[in-house]
Image: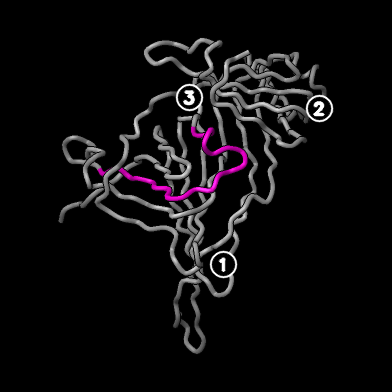
Amino acid sequence: MAQGDRATIGVVDIATPNVTIGGLTDLPFPPGVQEVVEGSAGVDAEYLAIMAAMGRVAFTTRDLTALASIGLNGVAVTTLDAYYQMLAGVSGREAYGSAKHLKVSMSSGLAVPRMLSCGVGETAQCSFEAFAISADGATNPITVTADQTMPDDGSVDDVWTIGPIELNTVDYDVGSVSIDFGLDVAQEPPTEGDTYPKLCLIANRRPRITLTTLSAEAMATITSAGLALTSFAVYFRKLAARGTRVAEVTAEHVKISGTTGMAIPGDSSASIGGGRLATPITIVPDTSPPLTISTASAIT
């Protein structure tokens, strides 16, 4: 018996906002099916049905410019298509223009950023999640179809790595940074006996930036009780294709910044044998908007 067909990560293509996102590293599809199983007189189940389907599409990409389309406010999306590229026995991949690929299509929903992270010697990655919304509660907002053409080959066009990090205009020597955009998304359960959700919204925004510094002086600056912030900025430095780094004055770097908040120290540690002192620091904004995102910034 033949093993059958196989697929791998492709691209995400959104009609509104009009953006195609490649450079993916992860592309899960949680259909969110909730079943109901009932029984009475017998030992075994006697009745099975689908109570609800709270579908989502998630993806992680190296293309940080996706944050220009899906930012801290989230964005209402129409026709979000997630493609899985079919594998070919000899060539490795079916051509993206051939009608052989699998498509998961969301007719409408809410897309938000989830996490942006990077460490020294790594390329930055940002994760996103889209929550499906049905027009009437009875129509499934997600369809899955085979034998589709992909709009793009999903190649990696640009990458970024960790850049300078400033607290109150002072540079900190940082080994890793992780930005949790802190969006509490409420995909409301369907009412009126419907199967699919008709409402999705952002209930709260509580972003946090977690970084680890190897600077011993940082402990004295931040103190054990934390440091009040009047400004902070996290840069992700763009790598130059076939080169090293894009010049700092070129507005192609990514900047996540804010005004007020606090830098709160975590548990510092060091170990015998030359283990470096490392201090985790959490930046908690306390203003609105809590963060400003620029995907076309110079490093200043």
Choose between 148 and 62: the one closer to the eye. 148
Choose between 48 and 43: the one closer to the eye. 48
Secondary structure under tag 1 reads loop
Secondary structure under tag 2 reads loop
Q: Amino acid at mark 3?
A: Thr
Residue found farthest to the right: 225
Residue on which the image places disc 2? 226
Please rate how many residues cluster around mark 3, counting C-alpha atoms within 10 Å: few if below 14, some from 14 to 19, many from 20. Answer: some
Query: Residue 229 sits in which quadrant?
Result: top right
Looking at the picture, how far across and down is residue 283, in whole percent?
72, 30
Magenta segment boundaries in residue numbering: 66-86
Q: If you read the primary sequence from the N terminus, does the residue marked by circle 1 or circle 2 appear first?
A: 1
Does residue 67 belong to the magenta stretch?
yes
Query: In percent of the image, x 43 and y 53: which residue is there?
Result: 106
Looking at the picture, how far across and down is residue 10, in whole percent?
34, 40
Query: Residue 224 sits in which quadrant?
Result: top right
Secondary structure under tag 3 reads loop
Task: Report whether residue 197 is seen.
Answer: yes
Cα distance in 3D space between marks 2 and 3: 30 Å
Q: Amino acid at mark 1?
A: Pro
Q: Is residue 229 left or right of residue 70?
A: right
Looking at the picture, how far across and down is residue 145, in whole percent?
31, 55
Image position of 274 with respect to 178: above or below: above
Query: Residue 143 sits in which quadrant?
Result: bottom left
Task: Report whether residue 120 is seen.
Answer: no
Q: Is residue 266 left or right of residue 9?
A: right
Colour style of the rendered protein structure: one colour
